[in-house]
Image: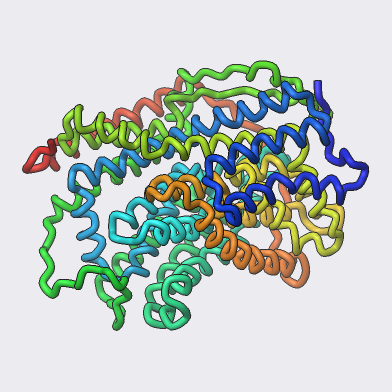
Amino acid sequence: MYTQVFDPMGSLTLSAFIAFIPIVFFFVVLVVLKVKGYWAGLMTAVLAIILAVLVYHMPVDLAVVSAIHGFVYGFFPIGWIVLAATFLYNLTVETGQFEVIKKSISSITDDRRLQVLLICFCFGAFLEGAAGFGTPVAITAAMLVGLGFRARYAACLALLANTAPVAFGGLGIPVLVAAQVTGLDGNTIAKMLAWVLPLIGIIIPFYIVIVMSGIKGVFEILPAICICSASFAIVLGVTCYYLGPVLPDITASIACLVCMTLFLKVWKPAHIFRFDNDVPIEEHKEKLKTKDVIRAWSPFIILIIMIADWGIKSVLALLNTVSVAFPVPIIHNAVISGTTHQAIPMLFNFNWLSAAGTAILLSAIISCFVLRVSRNTAWTVFLNSCKQLKWTFVVIGSVLGYAYVGNNSGMITTMGYFVATSGALFPLFASIIGWIGTFVTGSDTSANALFGKLQTTAFEAIGSSGLLGLGANLAGGGLGKMISPQSIAIAAAVTNIVGQEGELYKFSMKHSIILLSIVSVYVYMISGPLYFLIPSISNTGTATQVNSSALYSTGAVFLIGTAIICIIFSIIFKPVKQAN
């Protein structure tokens, strides 16, 4: 048995200094020494185990098993999602459908900045809201490369765009987890976020364009940026204020896509921003048939339908009937929480059918039938995707191995408590805690599980509202997503630049800190002159009993409906020429 220790040195400052060592080490070997990502991740995990054993006095077997548990979690469900998303994208390339997709996007706009807003910000927000866990970065970065963006440039832009929707990713899971660990109502937390997250939604489109073409570029496409920012931020704010945490990303992204597409049909920028090596724009473009465009987009249309299905409670309940959950050997109930003083259950949930990666993989398989891809071709593409991602799995697994060691030993909580010692100035630094949590774990959900209660307690201790603490944690966590080693590894893998993760960090860290500073000041203002924006706190209501049979039946109806839609797709949009 091991009881978590948060101040092993008897000095919180010194303990925090030691707790930060693995993070600093990871950055130094990756960015300064330019060590490959998988070696940097493995060395960081080993260093974390050593510190956990020698400084935090965690038993060796528990520290090692913690790392193994995190490593396995990196393969499933995280790696499973990345593999399935990469396979789906590679299928569209292999069948030639991505060429049609490129032409369809170019038919909306030739401006590279607007293409990034449409794909990474609008479409990426939908993918984040529906699936999360790296799916938006994987798919949007790959799409940009297919459109002719340089690989590293595409990866950087995809990471930057995947910040605004993170707090409501995976159908609001980060908020729901925050509600669970704090005892607050999820809808009330969403109301708080309605005054925090739209600010990020407004800033990001402007920021992306500034990164691409400077302040001058903003004025060149200012009407389009305003449409993009306003449609996303307004719908996001209204949805989370009145409808709760499940749908904000979905509604906001769809509104943004529709408004941008319709606007760009009637408005064109005077100056088209292109790259130096771009193919010259043809004056008379080939007119695409609607049927061909829908067929080309069919893998992603099917993906949207499948992810939407997997996000429905009744569907998940049905699919989870075949899940397998089992205690992790050695460490299950062997770690005593340093805050609750209760044993922490360590379970591995092998939800192989209800996992988001399975939904994406099924989308790819169905797309093979719709596009008439032969089994040999599909299998070859899948194997090539596995080879493409082999080192990515090692990076993700090793980083999560470190995260699990840090969580179980108490190192990550030490960092949180250290930042919380800033007293009355704490609201100014509160977002940093969520930022650190997401950086370490790769998940805003995990950041809230770790620091949600800490944030509410610290804010209430200084006479502020715990709701604002959760808002700061969720907002900071979203900005930490772009510097998460997990996200970096995914972006590098899908753009075929494995080994250049350090360059991605140089880009991501700089812009993440700038955006974090803006959000931190805004949260501090809400704790002071803008305090009236904080809604009154309500506790979670009594859970209602749901009839399992009715729930499963509803889920079955949704799945049958999806199957019928896919069959119709396959019949109507049959390719004229079959793929080899």
Evaluate whether residue 340 shows in this view.
Answer: no
**Farthest front residue?**
33
Where is residue 244 drawn, in percent x and y? 56, 49
Where is residue 330 drawn, in percent x and y? 69, 17
Where is residue 299 drawn, in percent x and y? 27, 42
- Drawn side of residue 377 relative to residue 384, left or right: left
**Farthest left residue?**
576
Which quadrant of the figure has residue 104? bottom left
- Drawn side of residue 45 relative to residue 312, left or right: right
Establish if 9 lies above or below 249.
above
Q: In percent of the image, x 39 and y 31: which residue is there? A: 358
Establish if 207 lies above or below 366.
below
Q: In percent of the image, x 61 and y 26: which residue is there? A: 68
In the rendered image, the quadrant that contains the N terminus is top right
Which quadrant of the figure has residue 532? bottom right
Which quadrant of the figure has residue 309? top left
